[in-house]
Image (cartoon, rainbow, N blue to C red):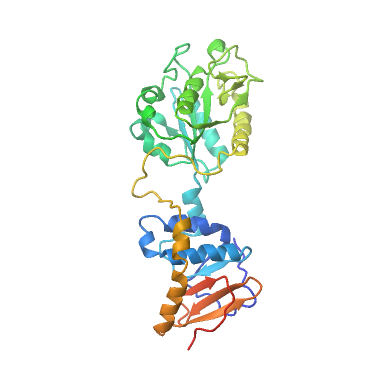
Amino acid sequence: SAISHQPSAISHQPPASSVLLLPEAAITVFRFATTKSIMPRYSMSSLFLLLSAAASLKSSVIAFSPLPSNLPTSSAASALYGTKVGVFFGTSTGSTEEVAYLISEEFGPDIASEPIEIDGVADSVASEFAKYDALVVGTPTWNTGADSERSGTGWDEIYYSTMEELNIAGKKVAVFGLGDSVSYGENYADAAGELHDVFENLGCQMLGYTSQEGYLHEASKSIRGDKFCGLLCDQVNQEELSGPRVENWVDQLIGEGILEGGGAGGAASSDSAPVVVDVTAELEENSILMEESIAAHSSSGDAFEPHYNPRSGVTMWTSRDGKTCYYTKEAAKMSMSP
């Protein structure tokens, strides 16, 4: 839990209805506030105040009011926006699903989705992919030795139809695949190679290539250069190695930046999905609204009183009724109280 730090030079305590947030939560709050359902109730000038105050009070807690009643706590907002990686898989016997769950659990629930079987979302794959900044996709191999459609799962049905229409260039994608490296040693996990190539041909940024060391195969269509095109697991002959391999691979993906930055979208978000806006111009345009708002309140008799903190250089302006407060970065030059 956060420890509230009240600057010594500010004598006015924020009203009980205020919400306390750490500065690093400011962007999360902004992203939540800019959903279609909330934005009309929360002005851009208030958002500017929040972000500018967060930049100034680097080690302090930001207090402000009023806020929408349905704004979540910082932990709830984190849970809402923390899921960056969508885990998708195809399976026939359940082995690929098992590894998909290992991967999802290794990332953690705030980062990765629960595994999603591709057969269940084949008709809405564009909108499903668009929900995530990055994708981890997996497949078994059944049509051994075939030139294409080698997974024996729903992936085969969309590779050269629905997926060819996706606009996901730049999205970060990592592939995992399963196979039997002994009985099918000459075609070990071939289908993972096709899965990789389909996403690569769409312009995705491919991550997670791994060493062939420690495997029992003779050949594989999943080899690119001298490495596998992703994580390969053998639940038949090397099941005990799957856990450690997944753990190392997830660490590798994080090191390669799978959680950094946003990924390209595949389809328009639904009405209920958050609308993330480029706010730079809007913030610059609306910053003056803060002073106008203070002046308007002052002229209407609802004066604001400044409480300047010389240590942070921030002034907290509190309304007479104590229900509203604003922050400015410059020193208070005069009291706006009558």
Query: Residue at point 46% right, 56% down?
Result: 279
Of residues 318 and 332, the one nearer the viewer is 332
Q: Could you say where residue 328 lies in the image, as x and y percent from the top left?
A: 54, 71
- Please determine whether, in this image, residue 184 is positioned above or below residue 42: above
- Position of 16 with respect to 243 (left or right) is left
Quarter of the image where one finds residue 116: top left
Of residues 99 and 56, the one nearer the viewer is 56
- Marker count (numbered): 0
Query: Residue at point 34% right, 46% down?
Result: 270
Of residues 117 and 12, the one nearer the viewer is 12
- Please determine whether, in this image, residue 194 is positioned above or below residue 26: above
- Position of 14 with respect to 300 (left or right) is right
Q: Does residue 86 appear in the picture of this structure? A: yes
- Please determine whether, in this image, residue 278 is positioned above or below residue 121: below
- Please determine whether, in this image, residue 272 is positioned above or below residue 220: below
Quarter of the figure with the N terminus = bottom right
- Position of 217 with respect to 85 (left or right) is right
Q: Could you say where residue 150 lies in the image, as x and y percent from the top left?
A: 44, 17
Quarter of the image where one finds residue 153: top left
Query: Residue at point 44% right, 65% down?
Result: 286
Q: Could you say where residue 74 lies in the image, as x and y percent from the top left?
A: 51, 58
Q: Could you say where residue 25 lies in the image, as x and y percent from the top left?
A: 54, 58
Quarter of the image where one finds residue 8: bottom right
Query: Residue at point 57% right, 61% down?
Result: 23
Q: Does residue 139 appear in the picture of this structure? A: no
